[in-house]
Amino acid sequence: MNDILAKLNIQALNQGVSTGLNWINTNGAVIDSYSPVDGKLLARVTTCSREAYEQVIATATAAFAEWRMVPAPKRGEIVRQMGEALRENKEALGQLVSYEMGKSLQEGYGEVQEMIDICDFAVGLSRQLYGLTMHSERPMHRMYEQWHPLGIVGIISAFNFPVAVWSWNSMLGWICGNVCIWKPSEKTPLCAVAVQNIISKVLKANNIPEGVCSLVQGGRETGEWLAADTRIALISATGSTRMGRQVGAAVAARLGKSILELGGNNAIIISQHADLDMSLVGAVFGAVGTAGQRCTSTRRLIIHESVYDSFVQKLVNAYKQLKIGNPLDQHNHVGPVIDKDAVANYLQAIEQCKQQGGTFLVEGGVLEGAGFESGCYVKPCIAAVTNDMAIVQHETFAPVLYLIKYSDLNEAIALQNGVPQGLSSAIMTMHLREAEQFLAHTGSDCGIANVNIGTSGAEIGGAFGGEKETGGGRESGSDAWKAYMRRQTNTINWSTQLPLAQGIKFDL
Ligand code: UN1
């Protein structure tokens, strides 16, 4: 791993504040990054002081004045080069993601691939920031809309996707003409240092001004500075609903813009018309992938009573085959959870589930002994529950899967929707009517609804995000770029009269 750290220019002690080209000295506290894989201290990072923060904001403000003058397709060209730089570093960065965060190596690579994909998407988009033209009600008038950059975009990202979620926001933010300031999770600071080093080379090679791509490492207080700062036009925050409530309220109090991508409580409905083998792959990957720490992780299976026993049998057998261990070893399916706090939350959820009446079909527990010294490896577990149990209504960021039986599709959809969160959902069925019922406006209430695909692993081309406590924001594909720009409606009169709209007469 030392080779990887060296390749990504990670030192024993890293500066945690950058304005894109250079690291800034800061006297903020130091964060230690321990790997959940083996419990070792990987490296240390200084956090952002208030003084350094002010410097970052001033530099970003000045950079915006220059960057917005670069034509969008030319900004796209810089993003294209960033995509190339990420391709070159895919292996090293994917390994670091796996080592610092704990997800399987395949998922680490997959995360870097998402970064590359969003770069490609953003390059094309840089020539397509289309506005509409409308027909004016007045003669010899033209009406149209254009999209202008916002200014500074603040990005608060979570540990579970320590690099990809930043890239969705910043790549779109940049082609839209904004400058970006990133506060990564304090649980994965080195992934951010590595990304900053990769991007910085591209910025330098193209003489891009200091301040287009800034990084401020820190904890909760740094996030609060960003959320409350009127100089930041848009805050895009990914994380828990608890965090989102605070950030969302602080940004709303100053009438700023926000994109919130918060918790999920995602379910797969497994119908009596499902292909059960296919459903099994979707359900198991959804529940145990990233050790159940994706916001799109499958938390609930809502299974038709007629296939319940046979499917549960398959599921329990599949769980017996799961190999838990070092995520860099590709024989293992499941790595550790992020830290010991996450282990405690997992244990507490199991305890509460039992107290509230849940029955475990696959027991949980913390693994001990050789290879598990970090204390962060837990057993993916399965419990039969009812949807109204408090623990089932709550998002536990760990591999705990809840099973619920149903007899009628209306009931299944009501159960699927009957939680406070609304991110991702899926139905497994070969029956056209069922699929359409699930996708109709009376069906799933989530931002993502899939048929014969699990709840996790969305492609970057679609808008990503969800409803209710998930926060309502959309990031990544489709027209999510519009949230990173301000819309201006322009009406131009090329006649010799000044007719008023709505036919109002006003003669002088
Ligand atoms: C997240 O967990 O915050 O859909 C993002 C997925 C990934 C992104 C998840 N593409 O599972």
Image (cartoon, rainbow, N blue to C red):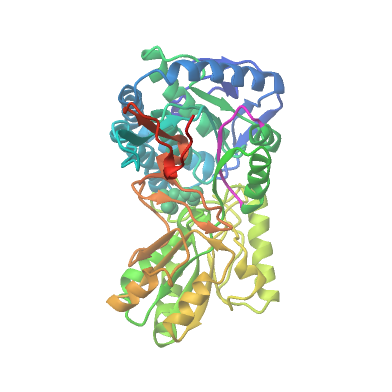
Q: Residue furthest front?
A: 508
Residue 56 x/y as whole percent = 60, 20
Compared with 333, 188 (above or below) is: above
Q: Is residue 31 visible?
A: yes
Task: Tell me: 340 left or right of 304.
Answer: right
Compared with 286, 254 (above or below) is: above
Task: Tell me: 164 left or right of 58.
Answer: left
Q: Is residue 285 visible?
A: no
Residue at the location (59% across, 22% down)? Answer: 17
Residue 496 x/y as whole percent = 33, 26
* Relative depth, front residue between 284 and 235: 235
Q: Is residue 87 magenta?
A: no
Number of numbered tags placed on the structure image: 0
Residue 279 x/y as whole percent = 36, 70
Residues shaded magenta: 229-240
Residue at the location (60% across, 37% down)? Answer: 256
